Amino acid sequence: MFLAGKRALITGSTSGIGLAIARALKGEGAEVVLNGFGDADEIAKLCVELDAMHIGADLTRREGCEELMEATGPVDILVNNAGMQHVAPIEDFPPDKWDAIIALNLTSAFHTARLAVPYMKEQGWGRIICTASAHSLTASPYKAAYVAAKHGLTGLVKTIALEVAESGVTANCISPGYVWTPLVENQIPDTMAARNMSRDDVIKEVILERQPTKRFSQPEEIGAMALFLCSEAAQNVTGANFSMDGGWTAQ
Ligand code: NAD
């Protein structure tokens, strides 16, 4: 239980990868704080399962980020994971979707990190982990906002890592390829429309086509990497971006 006594805030942890990271950190004794949207009964069950507090702040808003940090209090581990996707050609990309994706997938990580860092530096220990994406390293058509935000996120994390390098605080990105979560499932209809393809063809020819291993990652695999980054073995690992993408970005 090497995380006993540590408090971890995981944004976007009512589902998918964030929930798996919360479970992994809880499994090593961390106190976890959940954030994200969803069915109230389901979230209440998660709070019981993980003995956790849930703060449903909307992180597309600066005030939401500030409320989340205020309500959570000091954190030893900050996982910026909340994210959303929208798939459309650039000429049809709704400007409101662009604004929301940049706000959630990039700007919220700036706000939570700027508010979390002072306590981490004071303690001489801290972990900032951001769920980026293979799309932080490479692009795909029809995902302008997502690709721009994820590329930006890795730049933000590298900058934070350098600024806090001597303080015992590390900052890293994990970059999954396709992980089977609601985020992937929900983009299938839009991709079907954008590319005029069937569901099976989207899965086979668009999604798994990118991953040489031809398999989806499981959320628990991302949780295991987050746990490693919180361990003492990773104390000198900072400013890095870990690909977990089945070989996608090796191509
Ligand atoms: P998901 O849709 O299962 O989870 C997203 C989480 O973010 C949910 O808890 C949701 O409630 C929360 N959220 C959405 N809007 C929010 C808002 N405005 N404020 C606060 N929380 C909000 O998706 P996921 O696949 O688990 O994605 C998690 C992260 O992993 C995202 O940053 C995503 O870009 C990244 N990622 C996912 C994949 C994949 O294949 N699933 C691949 C690479 C990167």
Image: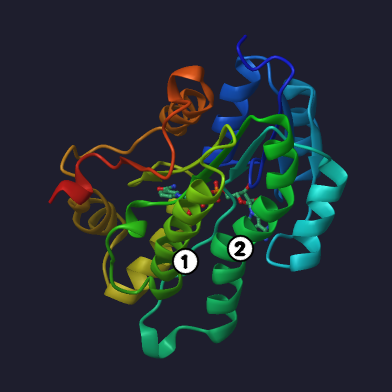
> Judging from the image, what secondary structure is the residue with disc 1 in?
helix
Q: Is mark 2 within 8 Å of ligand 1?
A: yes
From the viewer's perspective, is 46 left or right of 220?
right
User: Residue 217 occupies which quadrant of the picture?
Assistant: top left
Q: Position of residue 141 (x, y in %)?
A: 29, 72
User: Residue 121 occupies which quadrant of the picture?
Assistant: top right
Per the image, the residue denoted by label 1 is 149
Q: Neighbour class for label 2 at 10 Å: few (<14), some, many (≥20)?
A: many
The residue that appears at 52% across and 84% down in the rendered structure is: 94
81 vs 76: above or below: below
Q: Position of residue 67 (x, y in %)?
A: 84, 55
Whether the residues at callouts 1 and 2 have beta carbons within 8 Å, the answer is: yes
Q: Give the amino acid type for the residue marked by disc 2 in the picture.
A: Leu
The residue that appears at 59% across and 36% down in the rendered structure is: 167
Q: Neighbour class for label 1 at 10 Å: few (<14), some, many (≥20)?
A: many
Check residue 162 in the rendering and tell me which mark sits there, or answer none: none
* Residue 182 visible in rendering: no
Q: Position of residue 239 (x, y in %)?
A: 42, 45
